[in-house]
Amino acid sequence: MKKLIALVFALVATAGFAAEFPDISIADLKKAIAEKKVTVIDVNGAASYKAGHVPTAIDFATQGSNLASVLPADKNSLVVAYCGGPACSAYKAAANAANQLGYTNVKHLSAGISGWKAAKETLEK
């Protein structure tokens, strides 16, 4: 019984850290990039990142352990994480990491890299 109670408390505590992040549209992200008002995090892995990513995005696979040093000093700055597309939840690793570092304006590009490509947006390599 004690193990069951401990498990329930662990799940509840973990759920408290698993925040839901609001979506950002491709158009709004493009505008924020153009205005230099966003830090974008690609969570698709190093090979995918090298093949092409959203302009200005940082590679979470190689920069994740240094995330605090690559994010802006202002904790209210816009941070957007993305992964493969609408069915992918890998973005949560970066979004939760930013959130745990104290960033309060973390969003999710649910369209992901597949939506970015489908919209015929420019990729950076």
Image (cartoon, rainbow, N blue to C red):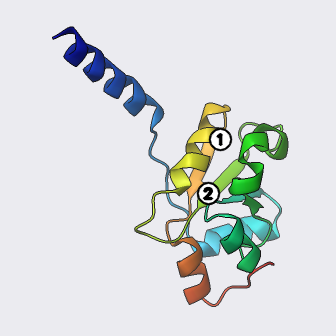
Count of marks, rendered view: 2
Residue at which label 2 appears: 81
Which percent across, then down, holds residue 113?
A: 59, 75
Which percent across, then down, holds residue 85?
A: 49, 71
For badge 2, the amino acid type reads: Ala
Instruction: Give the class, few, some or many, for how many residues have Cα within 10 Å of label 1's Cα (few <14, many ≥20).
Output: many
Q: Is residue 54 above or below residue 79?
A: below
For badge 1, the amino acid type reads: Ala
Q: Is residue 33 above or below residue 97?
A: below
Could you tell which of marks 1 and 2 lies nearer the N-terminus? 2
Quarter assignment of residue 56: bottom right
**109 to the left or right of 56:** left
Which one is nearer the viewer's eye here, 89 or 32?
89
Mark 2: secondary structure: strand
Q: Residue at x 56, y 41 (%)?
A: 96
User: What label does residue 98 carry, if any?
Assistant: 1
**86 to the left or right of 100:** left
Which one is nearer the viewer's eye here, 85 or 30?
85
Q: Residue at x 57, y 53 (%)?
A: 107
Q: Are marks 1 and 2 in contact (CB under 8 Å)?
A: yes
The residues bearing labels 1 and 2 have C-alpha atoms spaced at a distance of: 9 Å
Specify the quadrant that holds the C terminus.
bottom right
Q: Residue at x 79, y 78 (%)?
A: 124
